[in-house]
Image: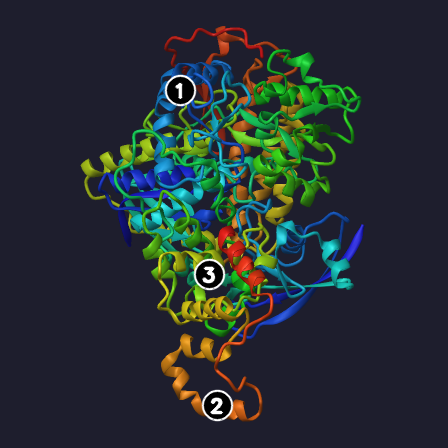
Amino acid sequence: MASTTFRVFRYQPDSGDLESYHQDFNLDHEEKTTVLDALLRIQNEQDGTLAVRYSCRSAICGSCACKVNGKTVLACMTQVEEAKAESGSSTLQVDPIGNFAPIKDLVVDMTPFWDKFKAVKPFLIPDGPAPDKERLVPKAAMEKVAKESACILCAACYSECNSLAADPEFVGPAAFAWGYRFAADERDSQRKNRAKLYSGQHGIWDCTRCMFCNERCPKGVDPRDAIEKLGAIAFQEKVTKDKGARHAKAFLISMRTGGKLNEQLVGGFTDPVGGAFNAPLALRMLQKGKLPASPLTHKVKNRDQVTKLIKNVKETI
Amino acid sequence: MREHDVVVVGAGLAGMRAAIAAHEAGVDVALVTKLHPVRSHSGAAQGGINAALGNETEDNTDNHTFDTVKGADYIGDQDAIEILCARAPLEVYQLEHWGAVFSRQEDSGKIAQRPFGGAGFPRTCYAADLTGLVILHTLYTVCVKYNIPTYEEWFVTDLVTDDNGNAVGVVAYDMIHGQIETIGAKAVVMATGGAGRVYRPSTNAHASTGDAMSLALRKGVPLKDMEFMQFHPTTLAANGVLVTEGARGEGGYLLNKDGDRFMSKYAPNKLELASRDVVSRAEATEIQEGRGIDGCVLLDLRHLGRDRIMERLPQIRELAIAFAGTDPIEEPIPIRPGAHYHMGGVHVDNWGAAPHMPGLFAAGECSCVSVHGANRLGGNSLLEAVVFGARAGEASAAYAQEAPAPKVPGNAAQETQDRIEGLLARENGPRQGEIRDELATVMQEKVGVFREDATLREAKATVDELKQQFQGVVVDDKGKTFNTDLIHTIETGYLLDLADCMVTGAIARHESRGAHSRTDFPERDDENWMKHTLAYLDDGEIRLDYSPVTMTKYEPQVRSY
């Protein structure tokens, strides 16, 4: 047997109290107990008003994502004793997923998440009528989207997303993983249109690449990788007017020509108009030695290796 | 009051397929679901969906029909099974056309098919071991494309009937906004899934509480073949989580504590791929006779090798590591039989229509057509959900196009509101969790893989006692918003109704057939018992009646594998 204090986020609007707080529940439990099992025991034995979403308890329905000691997990898949060992504490703090408004206790308003999911046109749009039997798809082509097809829409990625914290309108990692799942499906006819739809404001180029979504996804979907692959699709489809795409392109040109980053080129190419407004800043940076004095491209010694690297990366996408 | 032509309750495979079919037929259809659609338990189905595509070997609809009739231990309706198997390829192609990411053959690019229990040919189409998830998502994306109105997190409390006893809508609790509302409809399609939570352990989700069955039963609709609960041979010891039959389909072995592949004794031809009732009984016997390990036998996948496990069974590996602390690449997984699938359900015809209530339709696990009879074959549940979901959608739309505007009693929601307020006002008494725990424990112990008269009667006495206790049940949470305590309490009432039907049916059926295995009546008795059980609720008591099984061309044979 083991004993744990669960410090649970409470928000009970029906009581008239619109302030949230944390409440401690002490529970004796078997060593092998998941956070979800513990929460349900608390609900059954100590406080029936505790609200939490859950269903399958086998890490497939995606209902029970929450934060355990600040880290987003599926409650059903998280062993209490392992979480305690990881944090070195006998108390586990349980909070709702981040980047959402609370409804009651651990239950949050998922509406923005579903709206954004729907906004990426998450359905196959094939070209022409269907054949009598199945469409033939090479095994390798189908496996290209296998990882993203395993997304259970639990919103763990959304909870951890730093771009969303800065811009609540950002479409978010899960929806883009689904976007990639269709854009890269060879049965879909909308590759270019999808590249356009996913670019622009709040789009793929607004991802800050913090990698938290990859790290915290309980199903190994790697949404950041999907966003990156969508970026590559945008390039292949020549959807590159976006500031983010131009920024990436400037990087590439700069790498190709000099083998190293040329800040002036990147800044100017990404945002020629905005860049001009920043001229006074650039001047001051120049004076302080923060910018190279010559706009001419410096070249690294082993540029052939950089070229090789670029080629390798291109081939893997 | 809200109103639609057709209201579908439940948004798993059967519900969404029905809604799509009704939408395509041109009626105004809405989904009502206590979960978000993608949370539905269809998503937990792992191994696959059967269709005689013949992609791996020669196969045909007749083979599939015969295997299903035999698997059902000759109590499935053969005309319904013929419909199921004939439409199977069309539905699988349809799912593929909608974008389902089925695993593919290496060279041809066709849908790959794997061997499954009780099947003569490799017939099970799959998406690694995420088949249910992929199909659930595919149907959801179609619902999004069609913009089908969906009442998410609306818990249905009542089926509403008019003065003539026709189904004319539902009353539901909008969990987020804390309102109770009536949704009127010309036709109601019930698709709320199984009642696996009558048992513990169970592979089923916490939400699998058989809601539709109880809602229909309470309105006078009979439930069919309720005594047939399938125990899946491979569930994790810790919490009953499912390990797909695909693990054996891919070549996994079952071993006892001596390392013997014991299935050679019980099913010398099909071994691990005998039908589920046969394998579960074999495991239970090995364990009872002392050849188990801590109440389990072992599922050994090591010889499949890392690559095959990672490609075909990635989820199984993840779940075994998370819940059993076992990596199947390195060591065998301890498993045991666990409650999994309920063959019984709302008595409906081949179109999913309830003969006892005009306007009521049902599809998927909550219904009983019957195609699974006394034992369902693996890979046939997803199939049944889409085939009979589509048919119920088509039939309900056709019905709604002919039906007059529904005459919904104006006080329907108010009656529910009053009843719930009465329940919430109660201060002293047992809580639902205690009642549910005791129910699940007694069902597991006394209405399990093997059954006999004395213990079944003990179970019945406990169920009766718990039903009494439930009359005084107390809800802790008195609030309006997202009151899960209230919902669980109502669900527990459903579970008690259904357990009563299961036990009562099991006591009466004096034979062993499929999943219903009586140690005191070990033989199948076609002369007296080749018939469906119908359970009615009369003044709080279960009354049984029987109806004939439809035969076409498959004569009952001795069932061996």
- Point out which mark residue A110 bears: 3
Q: Nearer the viewer, residue B473 or B145?
A: B145
Relative to residue A33, is residue A304 drawn left or right? left
Looking at the picture, does residue B335 appear above or below residue B146? above
- Point out which mark residue B559 bears: none
Label 2 vs 3, first from the N-terminus: 3
Chain letter of mark 3 equals A
Q: Identify the residue position indicated by label 1 in the image.
A: B81
Q: Nearer the viewer, residue B190 or B110?
A: B110
Question: Would you say residue B39 is visible in this rendering?
Answer: yes
Chain letter of mark 1 equals B
Residue drawn 56% across and 68% down? Answer: A11
Q: Residues within 10 Å of mark 1 (few under 14, many from 20)?
A: many
Question: How far apart, in angstroms, are the residues tagged by discs 2 and 1?
Answer: 76 Å
* Viewer-side label of 2, 3: 2
Residue drawn 66% across and 13% down? Answer: B266
Tell whether label 3 touches label 2 (CB within 8 Å): no
Q: Residue B306, percent across and down?
A: 66, 36
Q: Identify the residue position indicated by label 2 in the image.
A: A281
Q: Amino acid at mark 2?
A: Leu
Q: Residue B353, percent across and down?
A: 32, 30
Q: Nearer the viewer, residue B40 or B107?
A: B107
Residue under disc 1 on the same chain as residue under disc 3: no
Q: Residue B360, percent across and down?
A: 33, 35
Tell whether label 3 touches label 1 (CB within 8 Å): no
Q: Residue A230, percent across and down?
A: 44, 57
Q: Residues within 10 Å of mark 3 (few under 14, many from 20)?
A: some
